[in-house]
Amino acid sequence: MLKKFFSLVAGVFFVAASAWAAVEINTADQAALDGVAGIGPATSKAILEERKKNGNFKDWADLEQRVRGIGEKNSVKLSAAGLIVNGQPRNQGASSAMLAKPAKAEPAKAEPVPVKASGAKN
């Protein structure tokens, strides 16, 4: 019975700890940003300066475009480490171009149909 109780308490602690791990880029201070694996003092300073200069980040694509050193691969790692933008983790299957705007469907091209010349022998 006591083991079950401690297991329950440990499980609740683990869930609570993982909830605290999320760091919102638009509200975090430098210490919180530095706490995300993959963000060092130079990157956190660049994030804060860009956010102060041009406002909050709209989405992951916006972050990748505005902060030097944060590209598609790096943003996937940062999201896995707990960084979120506007409450959203990065969609790990989508590229930044896909996140920025939906793709347009191109119309299908018709294949030319071969035509036999009259009088041709098979």
Image (spheres, rainbow, N blue to C red):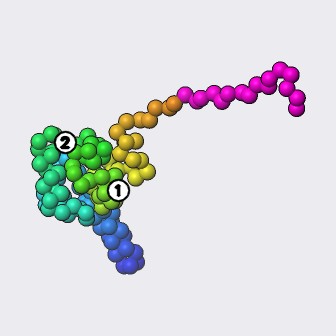
Instruction: Locate residue 61, reporting x and y percent.
Output: 31, 44
Q: CA distance from mark 2 to mark 1?
A: 21 Å
Please give the name of the residue rendered at 25% of the width and 63% of the height, measured from the top-left corner.
Answer: 38
Q: Quadrant location of residue 102? A: top left
In the rendered image, residue 117 lying in the magenta stretch gets the answer: yes
Label 1: few (<14), some (14–19) or many (≥20) C-alpha neighbours in 10 Å: few
Residue at image position (24%, 55%) is 69
Residue beneath disc 1: 73
- Reading the image, the residue beneath label 2 is 56
**SS of the residue at dot 2?**
loop
Mark nearer the N terminus (2 vs 1):
2
Instruction: Give, as a single range, the part of the protein colored magenta.
Output: 107-122
| Residue occupying the far top of the picture | 118
In the rendered structure, which amino acid carries the disc numbered 1?
Answer: Lys
Left or right, 118 with reference to 13: right
Q: Secondary structure at mark 1?
A: helix
Three-letter amino acid code at the position of disc 2: Asn
Q: Position of residue 118 (x, y in %)?
A: 83, 20
Instruction: Give the main secondary structure, helix, strand or loop, of the magenta stretch.
Output: loop
| 84 horizontally vs 51: left or right | right
37 horizontally vs 53: left or right: right
- Looking at the rendered image, the disc whose residue lies closer to the viewer, 2 or 1, is 1
Asked whether the viewer can see residue 65, the reply is yes
